[in-house]
Amino acid sequence: MKPTATYPLKLAAVLLAALPSCKSSIEKIREINDIQNIPSLRIENLDGRMTELGGLRVRFVTPELLQFYFAEEKYTEFPKGIEIYRYNDSTILESSITANHAVNYEAKDLWEATGNVVVKNMQGDELRTEKLFWDQKTKKIYTDALVKIIDTQKGTIIFGKGLVSDESFTDYEIKEVFDSVIYVDDKK
């Protein structure tokens, strides 16, 4: 028995009948079948490591990873948050980044972190913002959003808008500092 085209036509008719709205039925079928919007890979509870010449460079922990391999621009999304730990050549922890959501645009070597983003370095500095980019090519992190920097060594909290830093968050510049430097005295 030869296969016929009736099954796909019947399926299309059912989909057309089940999708009422302002959009045309053809547009709705295209959206359902749009492979670019369907993850090609899904991993839960991932503890991943990236190494270079046998040494640990980056470790990332996430409850969910979604990879969109067939998207126009391939990307990996971390919709339930991520923790990223960066290590130096001696595999000593240099800095960490946590966020409620992140996207890695693979072709650009660019990460975008959003929602309660916290960056810490090993000198005791802490950056808090709502949006941060990490450019792996230039080895920079940056944002145009509001920032709060807590320097535990100096005992200060600085507020500003916008920041550019090296990826280990040891050499940074706030683009616009507000008149809000607060000195914290822990000795009282």
Image: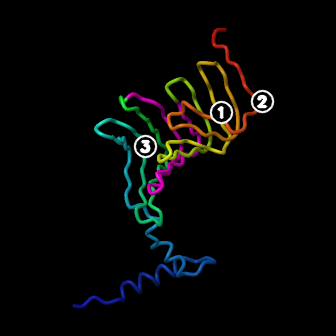
Q: Quadrant of the C terminus?
A: top right
Number of on-image labels: 3
The front one of 23 and 51 is 51
Marks 2/1: CA–CA distance: 12 Å
**Residue 54 position (above or below residue 39):** above
Q: Is residue 2 left or right of residue 127?
A: left
Which numbered dot is residue 62? Answer: 3
The front one of 14 and 53 is 53
Q: Which residues are magenta?
A: 92-120
Q: Dot 3: what SS?
A: strand
> Is disc 1 surrounded by few (<14), some (14 to 19) or many (20+) residues within 10 Å?
some
User: Could you tell me the amino acid type at mark 2?
Assistant: Asp
Residue 21 percent location from the top left of the image: 61, 76
**Residue 104 position (above or below residue 5):** above
Q: Is residue 49 left or right of residue 19?
A: left
Marks 2/3: CA–CA distance: 37 Å
**Residue 176 position (above or below residue 16):** above
Q: Is residue 99 magenta?
A: yes
Residue farthest toward the right in the current orientation of the protein: 179
Badge 2 is on which residue? 179
State the residue at coordinates (35%, 89%). Answer: 5
Residue 122 percent location from the top left of the image: 49, 25
